[in-house]
Image (cartoon, rainbow, N blue to C red):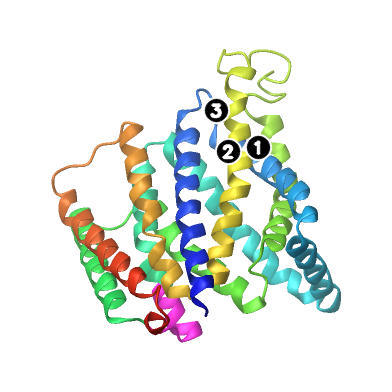
């Protein structure tokens, strides 16, 4: 991997994390909206954004052609593709549901645990090698995760859904050679009927008379539709950056860099009213130390000899 590619991968990974944190905050701030309805708007608007953007990009057109040829020549690929769509669909829904139901910190912790499971996946399926500093980062993060699991008497189900399902998704896509934005657009297309159903039956849809009047929240639709629209558009941009990072970086480094996102998500959770006790220092302190190790390793990786 070239130094330039690694640098681009780090940049887009951090940008994706920041955008996902913004989406998390907006989802938890919409009054009178259900997670399913927000999920529906995210699917529809993200797909619409990609339908405009992808044909304008030479890379996007090439990805669409390659994906179409792959499915045409090997129709059996639709089966693992459907599995990938289910996995990512659950993740998109959970990301909308958690901040509305007091589980934002549980989901945030799932994203803290995700890099550890991604490192394991990278080692098992792709033979990724870890530098000394990356090993120290994994060890420090593991200590924080162990404290959280012990002090809480286990891990919440949203935590497990995030940290166990996402590695399946990324390993599957990389093995199939479909780790690109066109494949994500195809997954959204598969979710489109469900997304439209959630919109029509949600508080602001036909069932809630939101398309004709104030809707279940009692607010004029235009006062909160901007939030759902922003989630859809920012979701497209964030996934573009995230998938580019997964393509340009080794799976282990890609996983470790995703520590940036849960740090931001914890901050959003606190803004939304959730509370952390003092014992959280024993959970998040080691994880922040892991980020320091990762930052130092990232600086070393800027030099050709640092790429191992």
Q: Tell me: 273 left or right of 89.
A: left
Find out whether the residues at labels 2 and 1 contact each other: C-beta distance under 8 Å: yes
Camera-side residue: 182 or 157? 182
Q: Dot 1: few (<14), some (14–19), or many (≥20) neighbours within 10 Å?
A: many
Q: What residue did someone put label 1 on?
A: 41
Residue projecting furthest to the left: 278
For marks 2 and 1, give the CA distance. Answer: 8 Å
The numbered dot on residue 231 is 2
The magenta segment is: 119-129
Camera-side residue: 280 or 76? 280
Camera-side residue: 151 or 57? 57
Q: Secondary structure at mark 1?
A: helix
Magenta span: chief secondary structure: helix
Camera-side residue: 5 or 249? 5
x, y (%) of residue 225? 62, 25
**Between discs 2 and 3, the one toward the N terminus:** 3
Q: Nearer the viewer, mark 2 or mark 1?
A: 2
Q: Secondary structure at mark 3?
A: loop
Q: Tell me: 58 left or right of 157.
A: right
Instruction: Give the mark count.
Output: 3
- Asked if residue 139 is positioned above or below residue 149 in the image, the reply reads below
**Between discs 2 and 1, the one toward the N terminus:** 1
**Between discs 3 and 1, the one toward the N terminus:** 3
Residue at the spot 61% in from the left edge and 79% down from the top edge: 175
Find out whether the residues at labels 2 and 3 contact each other: C-beta distance under 8 Å: no
Determine the image quadrant of residue 138. bottom left
Residue at the spot 45% in from the left edge and 33% down from the top edge: 28
Q: Nearer the viewer, mark 3 or mark 1?
A: 1
Q: Is residue 79 visible?
A: yes
Decide whether residue 261 is among the magenta residues: no
């Amino acid at each position: 991997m070239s130094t330039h590619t690694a640098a681009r991968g780090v940049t887009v990974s951090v940008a994706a994390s920041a955008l996902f944190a913004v989406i998390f905050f907006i989802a938890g701030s919409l009054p009178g909206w259900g997670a399913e309805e927000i999920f529906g708007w995210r699917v529809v608007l993200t797909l619409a954004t990609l339908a405009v953007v992808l044909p304008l990009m030479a890379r996007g057109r090439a990805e669409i052609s390659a994906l179409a040829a792959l499915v045409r020549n090997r129709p059996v690929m639709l089966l693992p593709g459907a599995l990938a769509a289910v996995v990512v669909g659950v993740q998109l829904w959970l990301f909308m549901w958690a901040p509305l139901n007091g589980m934002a910190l549980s989901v945030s912790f799932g994203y803290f645990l995700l890099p550890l499971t991604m490192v394991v996946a990278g080692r098992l399926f792709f033979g990724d090698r870890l530098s000394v500093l990356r090993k120290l980062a994994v060890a420090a993060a593991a200590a924080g995760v162990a404290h959280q699991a012990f002090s809480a008497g286990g891990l919440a189900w949203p935590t497990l859904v995030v940290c166990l399902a996402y590695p399946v998704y990324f390993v599957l896509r990389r093995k199939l050679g479909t780790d690109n934005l066109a494949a994500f657009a195809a997954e959204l297309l598969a979710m489109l009927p469900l997304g439209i159903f959630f919109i029509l039956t949600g508080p602001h849809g036909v069932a809630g008379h939101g398309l004709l009047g104030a809707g279940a929240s009692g607010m004029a639709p235009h006062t909160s539709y901007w939030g759902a629209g922003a989630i859809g558009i920012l979701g497209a941009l964030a996934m573009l950056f995230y998938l580019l990072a997964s393509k340009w970086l080794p799976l282990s480094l890609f996983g470790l860099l995703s520590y940036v996102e849960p740090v931001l998500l914890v901050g959003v959770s606190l803004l939304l009213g959730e509370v952390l006790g003092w014992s959280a220092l024993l959970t998040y302190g080691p994880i922040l130390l892991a980020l320091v190790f990762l930052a130092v390793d990232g600086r070393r990786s800027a030099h050709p000899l640092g790429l191992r």
